Image: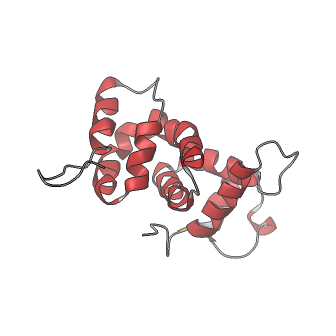
Amino acid sequence: MQFSSGIAIPRSVVAGALGAPEDSLPPGDLPLSRFAARYLASLAAPEAEDPPEAWTQHLILGLVRAHPHLALAAIRAALDLAPDADTLAMIAAGPLEDLLTDHGATLIGDIERAAPSCPRLRDALTAVPGHDLKPLLRARLEAASVVETGEDDPPR
């Protein structure tokens, strides 16, 4: 189930995060699904010199700093499209960890509500190094990463 359908990053937010004039960007807002695909392309080519999708790295950092709820949505969209466990781990140890370190207390309720229906988010939560997370936040994130099962349900 893709989370991002219908959600977009406002053009003004993209411009602000990239430090670019709004009129230098293509018209319209940036759909999260398009952003996520391009962000994953940038992760797939980490050693390329000046990769064409490098702007997505700057955008996700700008969202983490100034728009935490939108950053969480963008991260969830990327997790939905992550092709493998290594990519999921890069997202967890990168923007997700930064987001949780900076804004975890603000976002914990959203994460706890989303996690039961989002296995990739739960997996990413278990991969966040979280050295700088406060103990209570770490405990709540660990709890959110576990799905309660009935007696006859196999563990995930």
Q: Residue furthest right?
A: 49
Residue 140: horizontal and vertical position, in percent? 28, 36
Res. 65 in view: no
- Relative to 133, say whether 2 is above or below: below
Quadrant, the N terminus: bottom left
Residue 99: horizontal and vertical position, in percent? 50, 41
In front: 101, or 41?
41
Residue drawn at (66%, 75%) of the image:
28
Residue 46: horizontal and vertical position, in percent? 76, 44
What colouring does the structure picture have? secondary structure
The quarter of the displayed image where residue 32 is located = bottom right
In front: 149, or 25?
149
- Relative to 29, say whether 12 is above or below: above
- Relative to 47, say whether 13 is above or below: below
Residue 53: horizontal and vertical position, in percent? 77, 56
155 on left or right of 81: left
- Count all numbered tags in the image, as a single digit: 0
